[in-house]
Image (tube, helix red, strand yellow):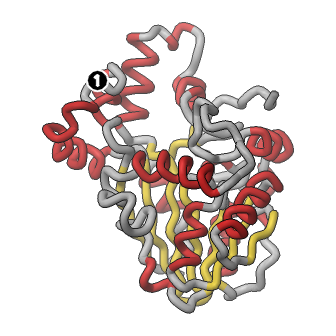
């Protein structure tokens, strides 16, 4: 059984001296690897080809609203990650989890480097690469203190990872350090100005479901996210945190058929009407989506 989850909390621009709960954070992810199999219905099987295909389908469909609308064709997150530019480049993924994004980066022709905080994630990613006959430099490593040389990477990718760390500023500094001049980073964190946070967490769960009687907003938000630590950030906070980069670009996206849930708190009742609501959901997601996506250039 995993350790009790620490409630989510507001974004703080944490310095190295304030890095917190690293051991508990690592233990949480060791016991709860990021497979997107939330109800554990797939089990772990033997980490065979079908297992990876099944968990990939969960992630692929879930992110098909904006970033990969043609799933299962094409690459995962293809509207966010510039795969064509990765060919023959050194690309690092921070927080590889079960290895889906890393596998698509490697298929693009990149020289892949993938790291994760836990040996469980590294085992899963290595197993995936073995099964699908792919090549990558996959290693357990703490992104707050990476072992790569200065100016060694052409690009860095991190989807939904650094907001779970004890020291976000430390990781941003490390990303900047390992990137080559002119290199780019592609990062996703949770958006504090999203409909999920403002409407679903505050209004529906906090007020309508009476969770404010016993919980703060940050505790409610933390209860519906993964991770021992889970922050939501505003665009202003993320831009401030990445101010050392020469260029910053921010966009938003969200999961398929979940935007209306944030507005009305009635689950997936609209899912069977997706052909009628998809355009509206895409419009909402691009303005108030849960995923705050940042493209940075050193």
In percent of width and height, residue 42 lies at 62, 37
In percent of width and height, residue 243 lies at 52, 69
Q: Relative to residue 88, is residue 21 depicted above or below?
A: above
Residue located beneath label 1 in the image: 269
- Which of these two is toward me, 201 or 12? 201
In percent of width and height, residue 45 lies at 71, 43
- Which of these two is toward me, 248 or 40? 40
Is residue 194 visible in the rendered image? The answer is yes
Q: Residue at x 67, y 69 (%)?
A: 173
Q: Residue at x 67, y 88 (%)?
A: 151
In percent of width and height, residue 221 lies at 53, 30
Q: Residue at x 72, y 39 (%)?
A: 32
**Quarter of the image with the N terminus in it:** top right
Q: Is residue 297 left or right of residue 147?
A: left
Q: Relative to residue 157, is residue 85 depicted above or below?
A: below
Q: Relative to residue 195, is residue 174 depicted above or below?
A: below
Q: Residue at x 31, y 38 (%)?
A: 257
Q: Relative to residue 190, is residue 96 depicted above or below?
A: below
Residue 95 picture quarter: bottom right
Is residue 143 visible in the rendered image? The answer is no
């Amino acid at each position: 059984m995993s350790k009790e989850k620490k409630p989510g909390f507001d974004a703080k621009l944490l310095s190295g001296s304030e890095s917190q709960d690293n051991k508990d954070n690592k233990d949480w992810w060791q016991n709860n690897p990021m497979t997107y199999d939330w109800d554990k219905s797939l089990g772990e099987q033997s980490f065979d080809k079908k297992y990876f295909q099944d968990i990939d389908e969960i992630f692929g469909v879930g992110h098909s609203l904006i970033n990969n609308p043609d799933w299962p064709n094409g690459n995962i997150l293809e509207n966010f990650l510039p795969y064509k530019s990765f060919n023959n480049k050194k690309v690092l993924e921070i927080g590889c989890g079960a290895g889906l994004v890393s596998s698509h980066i490697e298929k693009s022709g990149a020289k892949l480097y993938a790291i994760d905080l836990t040996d469980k994630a590294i085992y899963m990613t290595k197993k995936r690469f073995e099964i699908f006959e792919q090549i990558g430099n996959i290693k357990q490593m703490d992104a707050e203190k990476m072992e790569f040389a200065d100016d060694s990477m052409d690009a860095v990718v991190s989807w939904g990872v650094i907001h779970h760390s004890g020291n976000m500023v430390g990781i941003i500094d490390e990303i900047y350090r390992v990137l080559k001049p002119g290199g780019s980073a592609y990062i996703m964190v949770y958006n504090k100005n999203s409909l999920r946070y403002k409407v679903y967490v505050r209004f529906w769960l906090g007020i309508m479901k009476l969770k404010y009687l016993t919980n703060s907003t940050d505790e409610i938000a933390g209860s519906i996210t993964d991770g021992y630590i889970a922050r939501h950030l505003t665009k202003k906070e993320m831009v401030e945190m990445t101010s050392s980069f020469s260029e910053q670009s921010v966009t938003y996206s969200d999961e398929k058929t979940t935007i209306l849930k944030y507005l009305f708190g009635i689950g997936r009742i609209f899912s069977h009407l997706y052909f009628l609501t998809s355009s509206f959901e895409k419009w909402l997601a691009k303005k108030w989506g849960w995923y705050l996506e940042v493209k940075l250039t050193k």
